[in-house]
């Protein structure tokens, strides 16, 4: 499934990947431990596909390639979702200034 186009089937795969559920639960625990951390709350508010890609990038220090390999989707899909997530987080966090 290493294609360069990011079709709906790749996004569906990310959404149902067991690791995405594990990371979402991990993120929820971190939000409970650090309720005043806006970044964690806003990260949790991203759509599941975007969150599944942005979380390991920001919180675990994974590269785009590592994420693509782990989720078995194209690097182009990962890069697109990272850009979407970055833009969304930037907008959301900017409103708190």
Image (tube, rainbow, N blue to C red):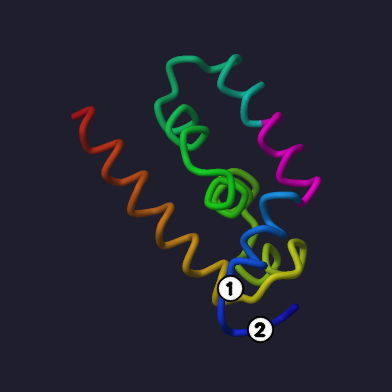
Residue at horizontal 73 percent and vertical 39 percent from the top: 21
> Residue 3 has which mark?
2
- Label 2 secondary element: loop
> Residue 29 has which mark?
none
Q: Quadrant of the C terminus?
A: top left
Quick check: marks 1 and 2 in contact, CB under 8 Å?
yes
The residue that mark 1 highlights is 7
User: Height in image: 34 above or below 46?
Assistant: above
Residue 68: x and y in percent read: 68, 68
For this view, does 51 lie left or right of residue 18?
Answer: left
Does the magenta portion include 64? no
Q: Which residues are magenta?
A: 17-26
Residue 67: x and y in percent read: 68, 62
As rendered, which of 53 and 12 lies closer to the eye? 12
Q: Quadrant of the N terminus?
A: bottom right
Please tell me in which quadrant of the rendered image residue 10 appears: bottom right
């Amino acid at each position: 499934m290493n294609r360069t186009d990011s079709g709906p089937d790749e996004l569906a795969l990310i959404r149902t990947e067991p690791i995405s559920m594990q990371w979402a639960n991990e993120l929820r625990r971190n939000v409970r431990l650090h309720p005043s951390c806006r970044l964690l709350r806003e990260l949790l508010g991203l759509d599941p596909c975007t969150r599944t890609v942005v979380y390991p990038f920001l919180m675990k220090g994974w590269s785009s390639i590592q994420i693509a390999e782990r989720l078995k989707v194209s690097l182009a899909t990962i890069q697109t979702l990272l850009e979407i997530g970055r833009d969304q987080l930037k907008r959301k966090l900017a409103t708190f200034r």
